[in-house]
Image: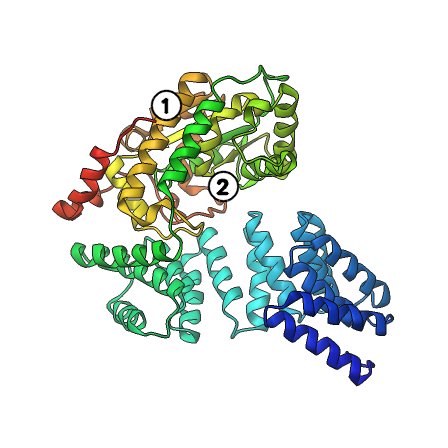
C-alpha cells in the first residue's frame, strides 16, 4: 500500500479485520470507501476482490482485479488473485494461465506456485503438479498445505518413498497433522512403525488436537494395528474415528433412501434419445467405493484408445446446474425433461470433459457415486458404457468403514449406514441394468483375480474395445492414479487375503446388518 495516505491504509486494515472477524458487509463497505478515496491504487481493489470471492461473487471479484491490473499490469499478486477468481468462475484454463504468469513475474511467489500445482493435480496433470508444488515447498518450507499436496502428487505418480519423506517432514512441523498421517497410511504397501503407533496414541490423547486431525489419526492407527494382526485394537481405532466423524457430519439414511426411490421412479420412462450414439466416447465405472473400481480403470486405461480420467465431478455438476436453472432439485425435474433437454445436458458433459479425449478417443469416468445417475444415462448419454464393479459384500463394507473419505457427510461412518447404502446401490443398479442391458454391465472383483485374461477380454468387449495384451500388464502403466488405491494397482494381479475375515467374530455385527438390511426399495 505504498503511496497511500495513512487514513486510507487504516480503512483498508479495518476492512480486512472486519472480514477476518466474520463481518463481510462491514468489510465491503469500508473497502468500497477506500477504493473511492484511492481510485488510482490497486490494493484497495484487491482487498475488495477478496471480500467478493469469500462471499461467492467471483464475477465481481474478477472485475475488481481486472480494474486493479489496469493500474498495475505487472503485479504478480494481482494475477495470482485473478487466477483464484477465474477458477471460482469455472474458467480453469484462464486461471492456470494467470497463476503461471504470476510465477513468471515473481518466481518467488509461493502462493501462485501452490495454486498452480494444486489445480494441475486436480486436473490429473501430476508431473506439472509436482514441479509447481516443489517450488512452493522450497519457497515456504514451513507451510503444511504445499508439502502435503506434493506428497499426494508423488503418491499418485507412484513415487512412494519421496511422498513419505514429505509427509514425515510435515509431521516434524506439526505432529498431529491428520493429512500427513492419512497420506502415510494410504501408502498401503508400506507399514507404519511402532514409533508411529506411539506418536499416534500420544497425539490422539492431546486435547489440543483438532477433531478432524483425530479422525485421520484414528484411521491411521487402525491401519497400523491391522497390519500388525491386532484386530481388536484396529476395530477400536476405526470405530472411534468413525464415531467422531459421524458426530461432526451425520449422514441421513432416510434422505438417501428417499432419493434413490425417486431416482428409480422418475427414470423408468424416458424419451428416446435424439442421437443414440451420443457419449459413446465415455466409459463410466460406478458402484461402491473400495469395490475394485480403480483396478478396473487401470486395466482400461492401459488400452491405447482409453484415457483414465479417474473420479470426475462433471456429471453431478451438470445435473446440479440444471437443477439451479429449473429451480427444482434433481431428480424431481426428470419427468419434465425432453429429449432435446437430455441432448443438451449430454453435450454439456462432453464439453466439460473434452480435455480427457485430446490424446485418446475414449475416456473413463470413475466417480463411484455416478451409479445414482445411471438410470438417466440412456437419455442423456445413450452411447456411453457403464461398468458396475462389485466385490465381496463383507470385504467391501469393512474396507469402506476403515477408509477415511473426504466428501462429508458420508455413509461409511457407521456399519448400519454402510449396510443400507450397499443394499440400495445393488438393487438400484439391478433395476437400471434391466432397463438398459446393452450398456450397463456388471463385473466382479473376485472373478478378475481368479481368471484375469478372460475377465479382461470380457471387460474390453463390453466397452467396444479390441483386446490388447498391454491391458494384462496394466500395473506397468505410468499414468497418475489419484485414489486411495494408488499403490495397490501398481502391482500385478494376485489373489489377496480376505482382510475382513481375519477379524472373525469381531465383525459379526456387520455380517448381521448385511444379512438383515432390507433389499426392497
**What's the residue at 39%, 32% (across, down)?**
472
Local SS, label 1: helix
**What's the residue at 44%, 38% (across, down)?**
369
Farthest residue toward the bottom? 6
Mark 1: give few (<14), some (14-19) or many (20+) Cα within 10 Å. some
Colour treatment of the image: rainbow
Location of residue 434 (image quadrant): top left
**Quarter of the rendering occupied by the C terminus:** top left
Mark 2: give few (<14), some (14-19) or many (20+) Cα within 10 Å. many
| Residue receiving disc 1 | 430
Q: Which mark, by number, is residue 152?
A: none
Taking the image as shown, residue 317 lies to the left or right of residue 12, namely left
Location of residue 517 (image quadrant): top left
Q: Specify which label sits upstream in the sequence, 2 or 1.
A: 2
Local SS, label 2: loop
**Quarter of the rendering occupied by the N terminus:** bottom right
**x, y percentage for residue 493?**
32, 38
Taking the image as shown, residue 246 lies to the left or right of residue 28, namely left
**What's the residue at 50%, 55% (across, down)?**
153
**x, y percentage for residue 251?**
38, 47
| Residue receiving disc 2 | 310
Between 430 and 185, the residue placed more toward the observer is 430
Amino acid at each position: 500500500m505504498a503511496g497511500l495516505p495513512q487514513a486510507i491504509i487504516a480503512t483498508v486494515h479495518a476492512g480486512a479485520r472486519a472480514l477476518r472477524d466474520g463481518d463481510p458487509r462491514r468489510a465491503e463497505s469500508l473497502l468500497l470507501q477506500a477504493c473511492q478515496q484511492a481510485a488510482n491504487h490497486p490494493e484497495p481493489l484487491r482487498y475488495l476482490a477478496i471480500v467478493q470471492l469469500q462471499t461467492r461473487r467471483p464475477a465481481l471479484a474478477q472485475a475488481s482485479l481486472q480494474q486493479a491490473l489496469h493500474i498495475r499490469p505487472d503485479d504478480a499478486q494481482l494475477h495470482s488473485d485473478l487466477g483464484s477468481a477465474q477458477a471460482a468462475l469455472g474458467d480453469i484454463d484462464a486461471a492456470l494461465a494467470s497463476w503461471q504468469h504470476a510465477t513468471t513475474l515473481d518466481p518467488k511467489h509461493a502462493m501462485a506456485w501452490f495454486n498452480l500445482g494444486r489445480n494441475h493435480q486436480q486436473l490429473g496433470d501430476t508431473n506439472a503438479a509436482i514441479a509447481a508444488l516443489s517450488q512452493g515447498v522450497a519457497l515456504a518450507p514451513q507451510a503444511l498445505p504445499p508439502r502435503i499436496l506434493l506428497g499426494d502428487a508423488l503418491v499418485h505418480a507412484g513415487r512412494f518413498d519421496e511422498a513419505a519423506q514429505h509427509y514425515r517432514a510435515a509431521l516434524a512441523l506439526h505432529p498431529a497433522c491428520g493429512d500427513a498421517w492419512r497420506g502415510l497410511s494410504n501408502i498401503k504397501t508400506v507399514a507404519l512403525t511402532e514409533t508411529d503407533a506411539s506418536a499416534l496414541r500420544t497425539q490422539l490423547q492431546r486435547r489440543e488436537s483438532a477433531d478432524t486431525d483425530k479422525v485421520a489419526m484414528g484411521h491411521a492407527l487402525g491401519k497400523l494395528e491391522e497390519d500388525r494382526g491386532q484386530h481388536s485394537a484396529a476395530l477400536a481405532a476405526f470405530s472411534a474415528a468413525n464415531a467422531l466423524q459421524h458426530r461432526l457430519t451425520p449422514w441421513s439414511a432416510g434422505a438417501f433412501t428417499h432419493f434413490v426411490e425417486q431416482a428409480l421412479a422418475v427414470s423408468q420412462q424416458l424419451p428416446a434419445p435424439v442421437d443414440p450414439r451420443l457419449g459413446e466416447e465415455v466409459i463410466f465405472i460406478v458402484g461402491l467405493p473400495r469395490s475394485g473400481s480403480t483396478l478396473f480403470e487401470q486395466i482400461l486405461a492401459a488400452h491405447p484408445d482409453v484415457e483414465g480420467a479417474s473420479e470426475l465431478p462433471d456429471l453431478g455438476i451438470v445435473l446440479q446446474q440444471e437443477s439451479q436453472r429449473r429451480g427444482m432439485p434433481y431428480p424431481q425435474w426428470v419427468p419434465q425433461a425432453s429429449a432435446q433437454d437430455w441432448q443438451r445436458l449430454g453435450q454439456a458433459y462432453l464439453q466439460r470433459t473434452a480435455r480427457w479425449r485430446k490424446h485418446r478417443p475414449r475416456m473413463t469416468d470413475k466417480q463411484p457415486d455416478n451409479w445414482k445417475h445411471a438410470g438417466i444415462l440412456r437419455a442423456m448419454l445413450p452411447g456411453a458404457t457403464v461398468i458396475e464393479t462389485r466385490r465381496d459384500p463383507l470385504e467391501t463394507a469393512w474396507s469402506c468403514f476403515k477408509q477415511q473419505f473426504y466428501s462429508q457427510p458420508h455413509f461409511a461412518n457407521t456399519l448400519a449406514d454402510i449396510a443400507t447404502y450397499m443394499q440400495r446401490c445393488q438393487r438400484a443398479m439391478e433395476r437400471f441394468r434391466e432397463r438398459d442391458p446393452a450398456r450397463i454391465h456388471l463385473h466382479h472383483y473376485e472373478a478378475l483375480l481368479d481368471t484375469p485374461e478372460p475377465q479382461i477380454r470380457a471387460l474390453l468387449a463390453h466397452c467396444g474395445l479390441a483386446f490388447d495384451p498391454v491391458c494384462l500388464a496394466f500395473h506397468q502403466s505410468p499414468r497418475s492414479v489419484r485414489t486411495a488405491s494408488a499403490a495397490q494397482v501398481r502391482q500385478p494381479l494376485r489373489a489377496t487375503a480376505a482382510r475382513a475375515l481375519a477379524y472373525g467374530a469381531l465383525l459379526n455385527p456387520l455380517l448381521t446388518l448385511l444379512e438383515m438390511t432390507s433389499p426392497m426399495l
